[in-house]
Image: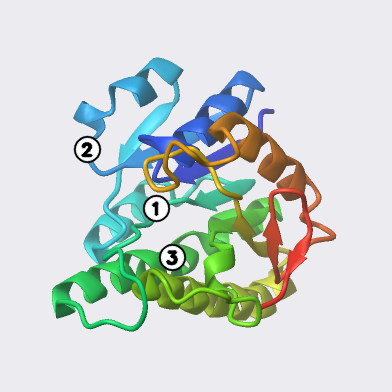
Amino acid sequence: MAKTVLVIGANRGLGLEFAKQYAADGYDVIATCRRPAEAAELRRVGVRIEALDTSTSSSIDSLAEKLKDDSIDVMICNAGVYGPRSDGLTDMPTEDFDLVMRTNVLGPLRLTLAFSDNVARARGAMVFMSSRMGSISTMSSDSGIAYRASKAALNAVVKAASLELGKKGVRVLALHPGWVRTDMGGPQASLTPTESVAGMRHVIDKASDLHGGLYDNTGALIPW
């Protein structure tokens, strides 16, 4: 029986590449996006597409109910936003900061709660796209403060989830994909989505050894 992968936020960039690679290797892929009717490239991949807006609890609850009987071997939470692009400490509209935190932190927490039983059933892995920018001990730039704060908070959620869900056989980890040529990373980035995702998939396959930490796309541990 093929393993099942749930890719959250799969209409473009890294999420789309995860869906493509897992589908090409014979996995049953459930890919989510906010507006399936507009996800033409994702539809061409030939995976099961479900509507999901991670910023609303009702949308998460609806998908969780639909998938309640499914075992999920790997859940990849890729949904995220960068928010205001800033250099240094700067104020920003409350609604902009709230959107970043709601999408990058509260959404993943709700997804963890909604699908932990599905993943525990398969003794699988829950994987969260984080960033080296969320590492406090390695921080050497003050740019993108809202994004940095959200990823540091996400890392705390991942660590807490690893402590609780590890007891149920669920492996939980955060991944830094590297500097990737996506809408967020820009055209000058050093990695293609194909290269980044191939590396991260190898790390995910090693998740029985890599649990409760933040790792880059080569499997190297990044300090919190």
Q: Are marks 2 and 1 in contact (CB under 8 Å)?
A: no
In the rendered view, does 205 fall on the left or right side of 32? right
Q: CA distance from mark 2 to mark 1?
A: 13 Å
Nearer the observer: mark 2 or 1; the answer is 1
Q: Secondary structure at mark 3?
A: helix
Residue 57 position in % (x across, y down): 27, 65
The circle on residue 79 is: 1
- Tell me where residue 128 appears, x and y as whole percent: 55, 59
Left or right: 185 in relation to 49: right
Q: Which mark is residue 108?
A: 3
Where in the figure is residue 125, as x and y percent of width and height?
66, 55
- The kind of residue on which mark 2 rests is Arg
Q: Nearer the N terminus, badge 2 or badge 1?
A: 2
Q: Quadrant of residue 4?
A: top right
Q: Residue at x 45, y 33 (%)?
A: 16
Residue at (38, 16) in percent of width and height? 44
Q: Earlier in the sequence, mark 3 or mark 2?
A: 2
- Amino acid type shown at disc 1: Ala
Position of residue 186 measured from the top left corner of the image (x, y, whole percent): 42, 42
Decide: few, some or many residues near mark 2? Use Cα within 10 Å; few <14, some 14-19, many ≥20: few
**In-image side of 7 versus 160 (left or right):** left
State whether residue 196 is above or below residue 99: above
Examine the rendered structure and indicate whether residue 80 appears above or below residue 221: above
User: Which of the two residues, 47 or 132, is positioned nearer the viewer here?
Assistant: 132
Cα–Cα gap, marks 3 and 2? 19 Å
Q: Which residue is at the front of the view, 143 or 163?
A: 143
The quarter of the image holding the C terminus is: bottom right
The type of residue carrying mark 3 is: Pro
Kindly check if marks 3 and 1 are in contact, taking CB atoms under 8 A apart as contact: yes
The circle on residue 35 is 2
Of the numbered discs 3 and 1, the one sitting upstream in the chain is 1
Q: How far apart in space, not on screen, are marks 3 and 1 (Cα)? A: 8 Å
